[in-house]
Image (spheres, coloured by chain):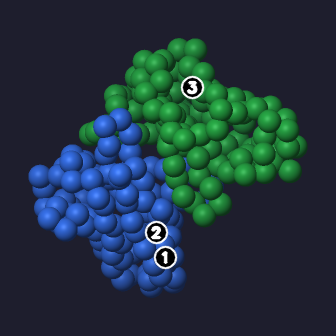
Chain colours: A green, B blue
């Protein structure tokens, strides 16, 4: 059984389009995250949600809007895509806020903006 | 602010030991982690150490923590080609992890 799943795995789109990436976890965790990994493999936190409430919102453009319909899902919607948004986006979840809790990562969504 | 530094690349021969180093800045970190990322995959927790420990051993993995110098290392004994991956050090903040930039380990036969 997949613990943290993301769809789609690959996403290729034109500049200016709006796209969404979905994430689901079946681990019963309270906390979910979105990370961005750039071409140099640098991994940075974008958002974290705990019990559907936004906890962390790092310096991310307003074009990125996370939505958590329930504890098991955290989706990422991106408006007006730009070339610099090309990256791999990882969803993760943990039993609670980090600090002794392992984070379980999804397989990633490779976004390419042309 | 929090910052985690790692060397970017390490190359070893199969059967040798690998040592990946990491320095961090947040002295209040209670846990420090090592994650592994294989090509095309997400991150997977390898091991972690609690801040009041100096060393933790888990089969071929040994984690050393020097809290005074804020230095963490991961030693992989008898490195295998399957260990080739990117290894991320991470420290805990209040509500998330801060990752280093990752060390690419390349193991040659």
Q: Residue at x 42, y 54 (%)?
A: B99
Q: Secondary structure at mark 3?
A: strand
Tell me if mark 1 has few (under 14), some (14-19) or many (20+) residues whose alpha carbon lies within 10 angstroms of its own. Answer: few
Q: Residue at x 58, y 14 (%)?
A: A69
On residue B103, the disc is 2
Asked if the residues shown at circle 1 and circle 2 are in contact, with their CB atoms under 8 angstroms apart, the answer is yes
Q: Answer above or below: position of A65 versus A61.
A: above
Q: Residue at x 52, y 82 (%)?
A: B108
Image quadrant where residue A75 sits? top right
Query: Is B45 on the left-hand or right-hand side of A63?
Result: left
In this view of the protein, which residue sits in the foreground, A53 or A31? A53
The residue to which callout 3 is attached is A74
Give me the C-alpha separation between circle 2 and circle 3.
Answer: 29 Å
Image quadrant where residue B88 sits? bottom left
Whether labels 3 and 1 belong to a single chain: the reply is: no
Image quadrant where residue A55 sits? top left
On residue A9, the disc is none
Residue A45 position within the rendered picture, expressed as x and y whole percent measured from the top left: 50, 43
User: Which residue appears farthest toward the top when viewing the image?
Assistant: A70
Residue B27 position within the rendered picture, expressed as x and y whole percent measured from the top left: 21, 54
The residue to which callout 1 is attached is B9
Residue A43 position within the rendered picture, expressed as x and y whole percent measured from the top left: 52, 53
Tell me if residue B31 can be seen.
yes
């Amino acid at each position: 059984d997949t613990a943290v799943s993301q769809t789609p795995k690959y996403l290729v789109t034109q500049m200016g389009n709006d796209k969404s990436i979905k994430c689901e976890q079946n681990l019963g965790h309270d906390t979910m995250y979105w990370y961005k990994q750039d071409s140099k493999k640098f991994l940075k936190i974008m958002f974290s949600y705990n019990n559907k409430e936004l906890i962390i919102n790092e310096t991310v453009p307003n074009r990125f809007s996370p939505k958590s319909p329930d504890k098991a899902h955290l989706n990422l919607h991106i408006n007006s895509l730009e070339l610099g948004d090309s990256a791999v986006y990882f969803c993760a979840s943990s039993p609670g806020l980090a600090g002794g809790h392992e984070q379980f990562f999804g397989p990633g969504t490779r976004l390419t903006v042309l | 602010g929090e910052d985690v530094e790692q060397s970017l690349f390490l190359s070893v021969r199969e059967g040798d030991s690998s040592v990946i180093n990491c320095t961090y800045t947040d002295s209040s970190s209670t846990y420090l982690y090592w994650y592994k990322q294989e090509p095309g995959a997400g991150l997977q927790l390898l091991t972690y150490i609690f801040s009041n420990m100096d060393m933790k051993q888990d089969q071929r993995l040994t984690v050393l923590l020097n809290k005074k110098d804020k230095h963490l290392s991961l030693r992989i004994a008898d490195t295998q080609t399957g260990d080739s991956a990117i290894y991320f050090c991470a420290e805990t903040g209040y509500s998330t992890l801060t990752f280093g930039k990752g060390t690419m380990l390349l193991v040659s036969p």
